[in-house]
């Protein structure tokens, strides 16, 4: 089946005994509200800072024992309903042979920015064997996690392209959008290369035991809906389709930052679960993607608010998510480095204590 023929958001079957996260991702209301946090493994945890001391990001991502330990830390501390593989979106690029580094305080920076068709030769296809350290880490984690699902992830082709074209992080993405409009044939070829890399990276994680995947499109919010549909969504759909072709029972989550206006278009890329950032109300998001499972969308800034404010907002997010077939509680962005782990633990406990909303009425 060609990627464009894959039914968008067809929910996998729910198996007896599925953990809460998998039940929700498959469109069923579990008895307990599932919750996990983007960037739950990271600088907010003192145990993370200890094990990462003196080790560069890419080096850490290439050590299966360290990846497993870091991935497990928030599961042990918080009792979240999922682990997400500790890695970085440029790991598969580097593994494929792209000369890219993660500069502390800056982010991903390629040795040479992408500027012309000749630069396509510097972006070879990814083979699963090139990320053997990731698949080994996934196997270690699956053995340790038991019933807790492991989420695999990859960066979406557009976000990967933005780092390569801009030469690093950028807020306005001027060069990226100029290339997209100025040389659409080269743009399509670039995104096709990156869709293969993203898709193969996701497949490698699923083949090793990841039970859910998430495609992150950090910079898609810089696009109009028309530009997203014409120039970006086809590549994201191909990356997501690579997972379905390998195992149609693995739910796929699609998340972008600042993408409230893009949600209906993102839903058509094929994921079963739509991640919602904090800039749009979950109630509005559910209305924009009717019939879809949603994930989100507590504003990370509220982790620094008084508990009575934060707890009220957690309850409100759960209430807004009740209009969807199912809801995975998460932040609307990653955990800030300065967040207090004790506050996150209280949020998890509260989400688990609050009653699970009944399924919405069917028409």
Image (tube, grey):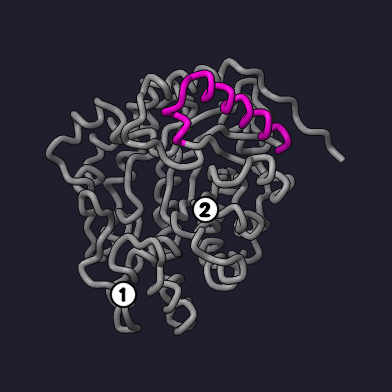
Residue annotated with mark 1? 114
Q: CA distance from mark 2 to mark 1?
A: 25 Å
- Quarter of the image where one finds residue 14: top right
Residue 140 visible at all: no
Q: Which residues are magenta?
A: 300-324
| In the image, residue 319 lies in the stretch drawn in magenta | yes
- Image location (x, y in percent) of residue 54: 12, 39
Residue 258 is tagged as 2
Q: Secondary structure at mark 1?
A: loop
Q: Tell me if residue 284 comes above or below residue 116 in the rendering.
A: above
Compared across the picture, whether 97 is left or right of 265 comes to left
- Image location (x, y in percent) of residue 215: 48, 51
Compared across the picture, whether 302 is left or right of 291 comes to left
Residue 216 is tagged as none
- Quarter of the image where one finds residue 96: bottom left
Are there few (<14), some (14-19), or many (20+) residues within 10 Å of tag 1? many
Q: Tell me if residue 231 comes above or below residue 131 in the rendering.
A: below
Residue 107 visible at all: yes
Task: Decide which of tag 2 and tag 1 comes sooner along the chain.
Answer: 1
**The N terminus, quarter of image:** bottom right
- Image location (x, y in percent) of residue 231: 54, 72
Compared across the picture, whether 292 is left or right of 103 comes to right
**Residue at the (46%, 77%) spot, across then down:** 180
Of 110 and 4, nearer the camera is 110
**Residue at the (40%, 26%) spot, across then down:** 145
Q: Secondary structure at mark 2?
A: loop
Q: Tell me if residue 8 comes above or below residue 60 in the rendering.
A: below
């Amino acid at each position: 089946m060609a990627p464009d023929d894959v039914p968008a958001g067809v929910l996998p079957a729910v198996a007896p005994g599925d953990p809460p996260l998998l039940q929700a991702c498959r469109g069923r209301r579990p008895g307990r509200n599932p919750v996990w946090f983007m960037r739950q493994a990271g600088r907010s945890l003192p145990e993370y800072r200890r094990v990462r001391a003196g080790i560069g990001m890419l080096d850490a991502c290439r050590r299966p024992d360290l990846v497993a330990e870091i991935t497990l830390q928030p599961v042990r501390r918080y009792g979240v309903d999922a682990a997400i593989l500790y890695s970085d979106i440029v790991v598969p690029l580097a593994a494929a042979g792209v000369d890219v580094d993660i500069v502390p305080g800056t982010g991903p920076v390629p040795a040479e920015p992408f500027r012309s068709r000749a630069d396509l030769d510097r972006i070879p296809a990814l083979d699963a064997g090139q990320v053997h350290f990731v698949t080994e880490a996934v196997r270690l984690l699956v053995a340790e996690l038991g019933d807790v699902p492991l989420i695999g992830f990859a960066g979406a082709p557009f976000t990967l392209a933005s780092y390569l074209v801009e030469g690093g992080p950028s807020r306005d993405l001027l060069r990226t959008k100029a290339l997209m409009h100025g040389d659409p044939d080269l743009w399509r070829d670039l995104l096709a290369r990156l869709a293969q890399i993203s898709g193969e990276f996701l497949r490698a994680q699923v083949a090793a035991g990841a039970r859910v995947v998430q495609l992150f499109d950090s910079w898609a919010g810089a696009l109009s809906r028309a530009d997203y549909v014409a120039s970006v969504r086809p590549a994201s759909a191909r990356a997501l389709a690579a997972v379905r072709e390998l195992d149609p029972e693995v739910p796929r989550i699609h998340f972008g930052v600042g993408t409230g206006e893009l949600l209906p278009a993102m839903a058509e890329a094929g994921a079963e679960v739509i991640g919602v950032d904090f800039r749009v109300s979950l109630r509005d998001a559910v209305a924009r993607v009717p019939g879809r499972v949603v994930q989100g969308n507590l504003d990370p800034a509220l982790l620094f608010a008084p508990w009575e404010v934060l707890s009220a907002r957690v309850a409100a997010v759960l209430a807004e998510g009740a209009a969807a077939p199912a809801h995975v509680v998460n932040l609307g962005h990653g955990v800030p480095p300065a967040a207090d782990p004790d506050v996150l633990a209280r949020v998890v406990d509260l989400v688990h204590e609050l009653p699970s909303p009944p399924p919405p009425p069917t028409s």
